[in-house]
Image: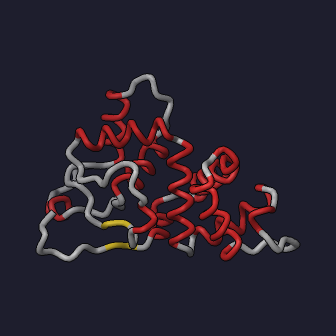
Amino acid sequence: MDENKELEFLPFHAINEFMNDEYRLRVIQETLNGLPSLSTDLRKPIEKFTNHMVKIPGFRNPSKAPVNLKIKPFIEAFEKQPQLVAVTLTAWADLHNELKNQVFELLHTRNWELLPIDIDRTKLPGFLIVWPANETFDTIYQAYKEAFPESNANNDDISLMAVWLSLRLPYPSTNQKNAKTTS
């Protein structure tokens, strides 16, 4: 990156513009259902933000509500609260640890600028809007399938993991804006 340029970030909840409703629901369900298997360090922030940002009728402590009652209000908060998105994606990535390691390795071999895999990404202000030139979700998926043919990971999960680990949303890079697209 050019050190003379200011970095532009979008808040974490901007990821909702890139997720369809069905996939957002699946990510949140997986994360909430997986909370008991997570470490306290990952579980506590979700419980804290759930208690402050998610309203569930009949529950003073929304984090204690059954997952099926928590889903809809959690999604509503997820769409508006950057901190909730950050802790949710941190937990989701941890629940998919093998995929996390594989996608990190893949992006590293493709010369992406990455923070260390174990850094706390929730401390950052959001996503960078600079996406590497000549990279698309399709090229990442194809490279992933070539590198890890035994994996059953789907395109959406690979794409979300790439976004989370790189902290980049797929806005066009300068090179992509100037390049002609072919369809």
Q: Which residue lies at the image location 57% right of the left edge and 55% below the top edge?
A: 42
Residue at the extreme top of the image, as rendered:
150
Look at the picture and state if 49 lies above or below 23.
Answer: below
Look at the picture and state if 102 lies above or below 19.
Answer: above
User: How many badges with numbers are in the image?
Assistant: 0
Q: Position of residue 2 (x, y in %)?
A: 12, 67
Q: Which residue lies at the image location 71% right of the left edge and 69% below the top edge?
A: 73
Q: Position of residue 27 (x, y in %)?
A: 59, 52
Q: Position of residue 154 (x, y in %)?
A: 49, 38
Q: Which residue lies at the image location 23% right of the left edge and 55% below the top edge?
A: 132
Q: Nearer the viewer, residue 62 or 148?
A: 62
Q: Position of residue 89 (x, y in %)?
A: 52, 56
Q: Nearer the viewer, residue 117 or 78?
A: 117
Look at the picture and state if 7 lies above or below 119.
Answer: below
Seen in the image, is 53 located left or right of residue 86? Answer: right
User: Within the image, what quadrant is residue 88 found in?
Assistant: bottom right
Q: Quadrant of the N terminus?
A: bottom left
Colour scheme of the rendered structure: secondary structure
Q: Which residue lies at the image location 39% right of the left edge and 68% below the top edge?
A: 124
